[in-house]
Amino acid sequence: MIIEPRMRGFICLTAHPEGCAQNVKNQIEYVKSKGAIDGPKKVLVIGASTGFGLASRITSAFGSNAATIGVFFEKAPAAGKTASPGWYNSAAFENEAEKAGLYAKSINGDAFSKEIKQQTIDLIKADLGQVDLVIYSLASPVRQHPETGVLHRSTLKPIGGTFSNKTVDFHTGKVSEVSIEPANEEDIANTVVVMGGEDWAMWIDQMKAAGVLAPGATTVAYSYIGPEVTEPVYRKGTIGRAKDHLEATAFEITDSLQDIDGKAYVSVNKALVTQASSAIPVIPLYISLLYKIMKADGIHEGCIEQIQRLYQDRLYSGKPVPTDDKGRIRIDDWEMRDDVQAEVAALWKEATTENLSEIGDLAGYKNDFLNLFGFGFEGVDYDADTNELVQIKSIS
């Protein structure tokens, strides 16, 4: 079939298998170009199919020659219907890993469930014995609690009052005002259940009990802080409460791993174009302005650049892992530089529909969004008939 991007609001309903494969190859080539990392050798990535999770799997495998198991929840293809992009990413990753002689297997299912945790543990026992790195990179809007069976939904709301500020429709470039009503206590509690640290701790507890964590094992979850302009709706809103919980959980996990000399970290990463961030009011406008500044300064990074730097310069540098006063790894350090944030704040005041294409990088935002779904890559013939029925070898 001929596959074109079909948009509905802030999501793309189609994905291009060859474009997704090109995306994976590009990331692999970047990691290889940066040289070998004396890093992990057996890695589990929970949320391994897109974004920071995919970048973590690629960096582990092609930077450190690691065997990897990836867990994700993606839609398989059907005749005349494309798979979700994470499915195609994972199929391409396994193909490239096989060519390189690297172990790579995947599990597709609800990572919040007891069943998928057990299936993953069984696979580690059978094939790897133990893992020395666990990356936790889930980004789901809903979670069915494995103990209660209750379905919890996260919300993106401010706390304590209505939030109003500028936003942009990145499809049209229209800058407008948006207002979001405040959360109630139930909204806050549900968001913490979905996006906080409870599930991360459950994974680590079950893996430790099963004996599949190697001595000295490290686990890392990803978070975001962001600038003052997004604070009311993000870091000081419902999602911020969940991130606070996630970050507090890192200390609890570290305490629980003392007997195997293990360690848990939260890495605070840079603002990037993802399906999730595209749906958050204010964030697309902020990213458009940020990209313009960081690209001009030569310090722009995508997911793969961020994670490669996290591994090489922080986690596996051979030195103690540097953290901030709250114990967090700060790989958002370039984004949060005072000069960068001052420029963003100045441009924010000026931003209008008429001038955003000049003072911001809306074109870069749109391109990155299309890239998420396998579109917009050089070397891919998007007019050609394409096989949508790509399978993942270790699953099919």
Image: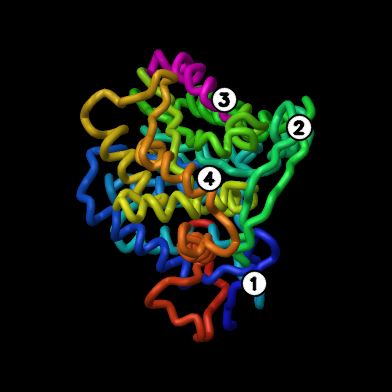
User: Which three-letter amino acid code belongs to the residue tagged 2?
Assistant: Ala
Kindly report the secondary structure that dominates the magenta region of the rendered protein: helix
Q: Is residue 202 left or right of residue 180?
A: left
Q: Residues within 10 Å of mark 1 (few under 14, many from 20)?
A: few
Question: Label 4, on which residue?
Answer: 47
Q: Which residue is mark 3?
A: 244
Q: Check disc 1 and report its element: helix, strand or loop.
A: loop
Query: Is residue 224 shown to the viewer in this render?
Result: no
Q: Residues within 10 Å of mark 2 (few under 14, many from 20)?
A: some
- Circles 4 and 2 in contact, beta carbons < 8 Å: no
The quarter in which the N terminus is drawn is bottom right
- Residue that label 2 marks: 183
Q: Amino acid at mark 1?
A: Arg
Q: Is residue 25 left or right of residue 154?
A: left
Render colour scheme:
rainbow
Residue behind mark 1: 6
Of pointers 2 and 3, the one earlier in the residue sequence: 2
Query: Is label 2 or label 3 in front?
Result: 2
Kindly report the distance in space between the C-alpha atoms of the residues bearing marks 3 and 1: 36 Å
